[in-house]
Each structure stands twice: as C-alpha cells, then as structure tokens.
Image (cartoon, coloured by chain):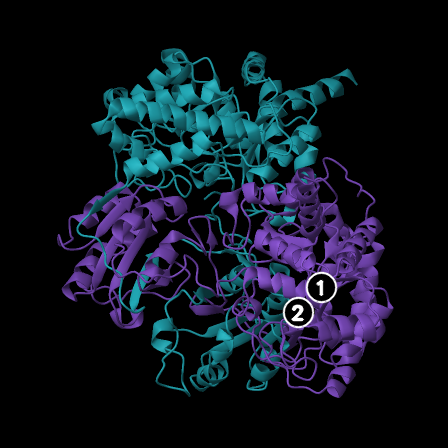
Chain colours: A cyan, B purple
Amino acid sequence: MSRTLDAQALRRRVASLLVVRASGHAGDRQRRYPRWELANAELKRLLESGVGGVILLGGSSVELRQRCLQLQNWAKGPLLLCADVEEGVGQRFEGATWLVPPMALARLHANDPERAEALAEQFGRCTGRQARHCGLNWVLAPIVDVNNNPANPVINVRAWGDDPDTVTRLTLAFQKGVEQENVLACAKHFPGHGDTAEDSHLQLPVIPHTRERLEQLELAPFRASIAAGIDSVMTAHLQIPSLDPDRPATLSKAVLNDLLRDQLGFQGLVVTDALVMEAIRAHHSAGDAALLAFEAGADLILMPEDADAAITAICDGLRSGRIPRERLDASVERRQRALAKVAEASECETGALELERQDERALSEALLQLTCERQGPQLHPLGAAQGINLIRIDGVLACPQLPATAPGLKQPEQAGFRALITHPGALSIWETNHPDAPLALDRLGAGPVLLQLFLRGNPFRAGREQQEPWEAALGQLQAAERLAGLVVYGSPYAWESLRARLAPSIPAAYSPGQMPEAQALVLSGLISNQGAEAAEPDGPGEGFTD
Amino acid sequence: MSRTLDAQALRRRVASLLVVRASGHAGDRQRRYPRWELANAELKRLLESGVGGVILLGGSSVELRQRCLQLQNWAKGPLLLCADVEEGVGQRFEGATWLVPPMALARLHANDPERAEALAEQFGRCTGRQARHCGLNWVLAPIVDVNNNPANPVINVRAWGDDPDTVTRLTLAFQKGVEQENVLACAKHFPGHGDTAEDSHLQLPVIPHTRERLEQLELAPFRASIAAGIDSVMTAHLQIPSLDPDRPATLSKAVLNDLLRDQLGFQGLVVTDALVMEAIRAHHSAGDAALLAFEAGADLILMPEDADAAITAICDGLRSGRIPRERLDASVERRQRALAKVAEASECETGALELERQDERALSEALLQLTCERQGPQLHPLGAAQGINLIRIDGVLACPQLPATAPGLKQPEQAGFRALITHPGALSIWETNHPDAPLALDRLGAGPVLLQLFLRGNPFRAGREQQEPWEAALGQLQAAERLAGLVVYGSPYAWESLRARLAPSIPAAYSPGQMPEAQALVLSGLISNQGAEAAEPDGPGEGFTD
C-alpha cells in the first residue's frame, strides 16, 4: 500500500516536469493542430494527475486569459504556462502586439547599436507584460542562435543577428526587458541552431563544427545569457559529433550535463525542444525520448509524444536506479524556484479587454519605421484598374469552412487528390473564349479531377458565382474523361442543376452545410476505402506551429 | 437651463432606440470590417450617451461573452445585444455550434414534416441558449422570407423554404425554440424578401407583385409569426409599388404603420434592416434615413450610418412636431417591455469555457446526416497522388498577414492593381520548362505587375520557397517591361538578392514585418499619390457581413 502511494507520489513528481501542448482556444473543435493539441478531457486528466506545464498556441489574447484561468483551475498546484512568442504575444495570439522579426533589429544594430539595444529591451518588456497579462508566466524567447546561414529554414529571421556580438547584445537587452515584467525567459536552442540547412521539425541536422568553432561562435551568446541570469535554456535537436558522436544535443549528457551545467555553470531550468519533432520522433519512442532527455540532464520535457509513456519511462528509470533520485529532486526544486520567482498575481482590470498599450503600439510602429527600406522611384497609380497585384504567400487557409485541416482537403489527399483552390483572388481557371469548354485544362495539370464547389449565394458578391460556367465545365471534364467526382456544398439549386448533367457513373454528393463536419460526412460516403493508403490520418511531417 | 436638460433627456431617449454595430473582438485593430464597426472609444461614448443596442459580429464565443460584459458595463442601462445568428451562433462566433442553412430543413420537411419541425425547434433552442450564454439577448432570426426565386442573391439558403406553408411551420418551431431560452427572436424581412434577384446590400430591389399575391405568399409567414407572439420584426429594403409607390418598405408608413401595425396587428418591436446598406444609403443621408424610418413606424434604428446624425434628425423631427411625442414614448415603451421579458441574468459556470453541449453537437450532426445527398458510385482512391482536388470558394483570406482589409490588397487596388494571390494550394504561376522565363505570363493576364513577396523561411515547408525562381521571374518581368514594382516582406536575404537584380527605375521596398501595419507603411511610401483616384478608403459597396 505504501509502495502504491509512493508510486503515485513519484508519478506526480515526474509529471510536474512535463510541459504538454494545448490550443489557446476554448473548444476541442477549434484546435488548429488537433494532432498535437490535447483535447480538453485529456488535458484536464493530465493536469489533475500532476502535469506541471502547458505550452499554448492559437486564439485571441482575451481567450488566452480565460484559458489560462481554466488550466490553472484544473491543476492542483501552480503551472508553468508558456508560448513561443518570439515576435511579441501577437505573433501567436490575436489582439496582442505583433512585432517585427528579431533579425530586423540586427540590421539596425549595425548602424545605431544603442538605439537597437534600447528597442530590444522594449521588445522584451512588451512581450513580457502582455504574456503576463494573458496569464502566461514563461516566454520561450529569446532565440540566441547566431543565424550565420542565410538558407537556414527554421531559425532565419527569428534570430537576433548573424554574428555573436550582435546576438549577445540584443538578446541580453530583450532578456532584461522580459524579466522586468516578472515573467520567465528562455535562451534557445542550445548549443546553437544558427548554422543548419535542414529543418529539425522534419529531420535531424548534423553540425560538423569543431569545439573551438562552437566556442567562438555558437556558445558565446549562451555564456552571456547565463551570466546575466537567464531562467531557462532550451535544447536543440541537432547532431554535433564534436560534442557527442552518438546522441543529438537534446538527449546528450555530454551537451546538457558536461557542457551546459558543468562547464557553462547553468543553474536554471533546462527544457527540451518539442520531443514530437521528427528529428527526435523518427528515432526514439515517446518513452525513450523523454527518459534519455531527462537522463542527459533536461529538467523539463516539452511536448512529449505521449505524456503517460514519458512519465512511466522516467519513473522506471528512477526506480531501477538508472537515474539517481537526486536528479528528480534537483529538477523539481529548479521548477519550484522558477515558479516562486514569478508567483505574484498579475494585476487585472476588468472591463479593460484591449490589451495593447499606447507605448506598445508606438514601439511596434517605430520598429516598422526604422527597419523598412525602399529603392527606385515611387510607383504611379494606373489610370484605370488594369494592373496585377501578384502576392505570393505560404498559406491563406483560415476561412471557417476550410481550415488547413479541413476534411475537404485531407480526405481527397489521402485518396490521391492534391488540393487546388480557386477563388476570386487566385489565378483564373477559365478560358474566356470557349463557352463549351470554359476550363483552362492545361493550367490545372494532368490527372482526374474531383470538383468540390462551395456555392451558396453569399451577399456582397453581386451574383459573381452565378456567372461561373460550372455546368459547361462539368460537360467539358466528362467529355475529356477527367471528372472523378463532384461535391456541392451549400446551394440546393446549384446541386440540382449540376447533378442533372452528370453521367450515372460519376460519384457525386451534396450537403447544404459547408463546415468541416459536412465535408467529413459527405466525403466519407463518397470516397471508398478500397485502395486507400494505410497512412496515418495526418502525415508524419504535419506542422504543429505557424 | 431646463430646456437644455430637456434636450439632453430627449437625446438619451432617442439614442436608446439605436442599435449600432461593433466587432465581437476586443481590440480596435482586430475589427474585420473597420468601416462598419465602431472603434471602442466611439462605442463607449455612444453607449454612455444612451445608445441602447449593439449588433455584434466576429470573434469567438469566449471573447463575445467578455465583450458583452464590457458593453453592458459601459452603458448605464440594460442593452439590447443582438447578432445575425441565423445558422446557429457558430455561424458568426467561433467555438459555438454552426448549423446547416435553414433551407436544408425545408427539403427534409417535404418528406418528414414532424421530424423537420422538431429539428427546427431544437435549432432555435440551440441558437437561443448559446446566444444567451455568450451574453446576447436578441437573436436576429428567423428569416421568414419565402425564397421562391432560386437566383435570390441574398436570402437563398438562409430561408426556411420556398413555399409559405413550409416556411410558416418551420419558422414557428424555430421561434418557439428561441423563446424557450429566454432570448428575443426577430421575423425578417418585412414584408418579404424572397423574390428578389438583386442584393439589397448593393442596390434597391423592386418587387412588382400585387397586394393579393403578397397576401397569399410573402405575408403568410409574418401573420403566423405575429400570431405566435414574435418579439420583433425587421423591415426589408425593397421598393414595392403596390404598397407604396414612393418609399422603400423600411421608410414607408404604408408598410410599417398601415400594413404591419394596423392590418397585421403587430404590437412588438419594429427594427429596420441595416441603414448602411446601399439600398438606403445611396438615396438618403444618415439623418434622413433614420428620421424617415422612425416616422414610418420603426421603433429601432439598426446600423445608422452616423449615430449622432440619426439622433439629431429624430430629435428635430420630434421637436418640430413633425412626429408626435407619443411615437417616441411608444417605441421606448416597447423596447423596455422586450428587455424586461429577457431580463433574468443568465447562469454562468466559470471554468466552463466550452460552449457546445452534447445534445447540441448531436443536433448539428443529425442535421448534416439527414440533409446530405449522394449519387453514382463511390470514388476509388488513386494508387499514387496524381489527382486534382479543385476547390472553388468565395474567399480564403483570413491569414493574419493578409486579412481581407490588408493594405497589401487595398492600397494597390486603389492604384489600379487587382490582387492575384499565389500559394501552395493555388494554380501554378510557373512554366516548368523555361528556367530563364519561369513565369507563365499568359496565365497572369495583361498589364503591369506589382510583385509582393511574403518570404521568411517558415518551418514545416521544407524550404519550398527557396525552390521558387523569383530571381529569374524578376528578370523575365523586366525584360517584358511588365514589372511595375517589387515589395519583399520578411527575409532580408531574399530582399538583398532580389534588389540586386532590379533596374534603378523599378520602385521597390522591403519590410522585415509581414503584418498589415508593415504593408501600410511600405506601400504608402512606395505608391505615389499622383493620379490616385479620389476614392473613399473603402469602396461604397464594401461588405460588412459574411
């Protein structure tokens, strides 16, 4: 019995070292990354069983505040509540201040170092104050990596510069700003992620540098940050043979214990980067990854793939004597010390929902003013509207019908159909000169076409959708033997008129609803299971952050 | 002195009849439709000065609850708080339940009327309960228009059917459901908006029907709704010569007073449709429209173009004797009676942020299940990914960098450049066979090209953006004399490499930030004012609802 109690107490202590991922939104169905963000029932169970930290993303600052109160309410003790707000809280939570990427200040620093450092400190204060106001107590910034590789696909403009001196000066100023606001900061990614050409979200990069080179370049900002009393350091998922030929930094005793603790003398919290990233996940089970990281010297385990497995693996390691109990005590103690430092309740004016202060708005504008550039003459407006404003952007999908995880995208993808989205702001799919064959088939590329039409006569479009020749397009695709299927969401009139033009052999479906649930329902009926790849519902490289 | 006091008291009483528009979001900068949604300082001033109602749109259910508390806090007396939640609260506020468009139930009603009516009542209960929980006390539904024109660009699937009997039965059930939840309902749009081929958001439709035909078709559901005790009726912006040869229904004494009050015997609140819609706004000043509507018999003035002008015009009309004081007393009295009916405070469990109940989720799913359709065989997955999932949708812009109101869209539009957005889910702009001329210029259409590149090495894209041949594209556009300008947002590396390829005559600019403020700043510098159209910042037909 006492052994059972001991086992439970041990699990709670180990659980307190986990930082799990949740959406900043209130509802399960609002999650943007449901594969990575725990559902509320599961989150509540884990917090009740002692899990001690949550990393949040998504939603607005008003929601985040309510959400943090809820999470704190579910947990028995104080929580570490953090977010990747490297560019201000507005980078992740709508309604807060969204600042320029840190690299912008590095360019400014070259011309006016004092001003750049003063702005970096304000950057930190703005981020810290707003984080605190929303209920967070831990800012996962600054990135102290020296981005000396312009092709770096993951650090890049998130870094505070491409030389160690600039990075050191600016990040020290930022760190000072955050700490003035009674919020924990975090230097990342140890021992330095600036010189990678691979994205560790997708694979494990290898850094071939010697210890001497690391000392001169990558480690310098960490040394300075530690000397200035940074609260936490985040590990990098990098293979660095000169430090450890076998293990990536996150799982390496040589890196975390020998280098970071012993040689650099860091006494604060060591937190792993997210263990669900492919650089770790592809090579280690959920339990193993957590155990190896803890054994190597990490205090906190961020985003384990399976929280229960992580707790069990670490408990087993402690019980078997593989890891001494003192390691656990030390990590728990460090966590409590960090929490105690930021324990004061934040002031909260009710009725004041608007988060951003005047000085924060001014900072945001000053940073933009100081960092933008221009060359050549001004552009003169055209007499009549005839120009093209061609915009290239990574993704545009945040309309409520089609979030990036919409069944209308995902289910066809699993059946072999890549998404091609047409809308009034996109390249035209129409050949204007061919009324009977209006689709510009050459632009679509080869292959069968599954047509999904969201049509419902929305206001303010001046009947635009009724001018699109979908009936003729349906005939054209069938004549070309390229119509794989048709789905109409919304208008029963459009559905009736289009279905009448279909050969009986064409799969087709309709729902009056346009929301993701309608898509899931209709497509599950439309697409057969035969021949479907036995893929995971989301591919392994699926994103979990912006 | 007493006259001044009287004047102030009169203004307050008149102001109580206004319903102004606000965003459901907390911050001014979060507004999706800043032209139509009051800024917080202005909103606070108007509520403090007696404005008695707010119509809300946008944000999440958690934010909406906080927002309603804030608005109620700013006002001295109880407010009417309403929203166009015709398809469940989730249609307008994220996190709440989003139900199928009402027309879906009409189709079900043809086969199983009892079931359809039971579902319509649950539809009303779900909408009413969630509205109440979020802090609203007035649901601007049901639409009782009979949609007997499939080309109707504004009512369409929002209607509960295309014959008067179906509409009557279903909307009575919905109305019953809403009222059970202690929330006011609203039958709209009087005397019937179902047979229009024009969008009254953009122009004033004319209905040529005789009084007899209106009696048989359009008026039937209104009669039933009034007999069942509907709390409010919303007017339509329609010209109906058989009822009033001079004035649209919203401004017509013949329609509102003689027909609705006297002949149909309606005793509840008459509210105008939004006065900012072009059907009214194009023909009347802000003050005149409000005065005419009030004089015609409306109790509440929804979305006046200028609240102060509306109050002044109505006060002048009352003081001059043009409108008897009893009209004001009667409207104020009706408003107070309606508020008293829903005055009980709603229960609020703290910590329970998730709005949707199990039965509401089940209702949402049942409606989808019962209303979807399918024909033909199932679609079989392709062996390898080679098909195209072509999706047509009105708009996709809700990414934080590019909201529909982004300067990156609007400022070039004013200078004559229409937006063309390219992203990984869009039609390709590239010719794969021409490394030196990689852009498929024929797909872009004619005209000069302003290129705006959002490039910043985001994670999870596996360096995709670095494979896009923007350097060659820049050369190609210059050789073709089609490059009007270049803007880079984000990566300084991309900016440096691209600017080096520009002729000195090409306007170009850069900002490390990608947010709307960065666009506004850079484009204001880039685009000269010479030759710009003297257009309003937003065109007159700009949307103000989804």
x, y percentage for residue A81?
57, 28
Q: Residue at x 35, y 42 (%)?
A: B513
Question: Of residues B22 and A404, which is closer to you in this image?
Answer: B22
Quadrant for residue A366, please give it.
top left
Residue at mark 2 to residue at mark 1: CA–CA distance: 8 Å
Question: Of residues A380 and A398, which is closer to you in this image?
Answer: A380
Amino acid found under the numbered disc labelled 1: Ala
Q: Can I make out residue A495 in this image? A: yes
x, y percentage for residue A428?
38, 71
Q: State the residue position of label 1.
A: B298
Q: Residue at x 44, y 25 (%)?
A: A125
Question: Of residues A479 and B107, which is closer to you in this image?
Answer: B107
x, y percentage for residue A1?
79, 18
Tag 2 near tag 1, CB within 8 Å: yes
In what element is the residue under mark 2? Answer: helix
Question: What crowding class fits label 1: few (fewer than 14 Cα within 10 Å), some (14-19), or many (20 or more)?
Answer: many
Marks 2 and 1: same chain? yes
